[in-house]
Amino acid sequence: MQIIVEGQEAPIPAAAGETILQSLLRAGVPFPFSCQFGNCGHCKCVLLAGSVTELPHSEHILAPEERSRGVVLACRTRLWSDATIRRID
């Protein structure tokens, strides 16, 4: 499997069941994060494509309008297929 990060040339290898953040960090891709437990929101990104499972996180981290735009937490989103994401800066 792989993750395509918009604006980055090469896809990032990923393993099924791994979080987006785990895959990115293992590949040496700089990506904002802090707590890795879904409490801080630093790793927000937009999921453009892919089959994922969202793990539990603080209900206050993602606003309803963010969720409707496909915003997820990279540290709490497990991959089950190729995925495409967009960074939020």
Image (spheres, rainbow, N blue to C red):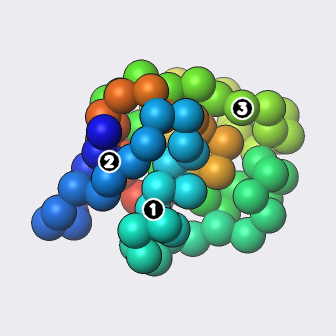
Q: Amino acid at mark 1?
A: Leu
Residue highlighted by disc 2: 3
Seen at 80% across and 51% down, the residue is: 37
Left or right, 25 with reference to 13? right
Residue highlighted by disc 3: 55
Closer to the camera in the image, 42 or 21: 21
Q: CA distance from mark 2 to mark 3?
A: 18 Å
For mark 1, give the secondary structure: helix
Q: Amino acid at mark 2?
A: Ile
Q: Amino acid at mark 3?
A: Leu
- Percent x, y of residue 85: 36, 46
Seen at 67% across and 42% down, the residue is: 76
Q: CA distance from mark 2 to mark 1?
A: 8 Å
Seen at 29% across and 45% down, the residue is: 2
- Percent x, y of residue 9: 14, 66
In this orientation, does residue 70 appear?
no
Q: Does the CB distance between marks 2 and 1 fall below 8 Å?
A: yes
In this orientation, does residue 39 appear?
yes
Mark 2 vs mark 3: which is more N-terminal?
2
Residue highlighted by disc 1: 24
Residue sitting at the far front = 15
Mark 1 vs mark 3: which is more N-terminal?
1
Q: CA distance from mark 1 to mark 3?
A: 17 Å
Q: Does the CB distance between marks 2 and 3 fall below 8 Å?
A: no
For mark 3, give the secondary structure: loop
> Up-down: is 76 above or below 22?
above
Q: Does the CB distance between marks 1 and 3 fall below 8 Å?
A: no
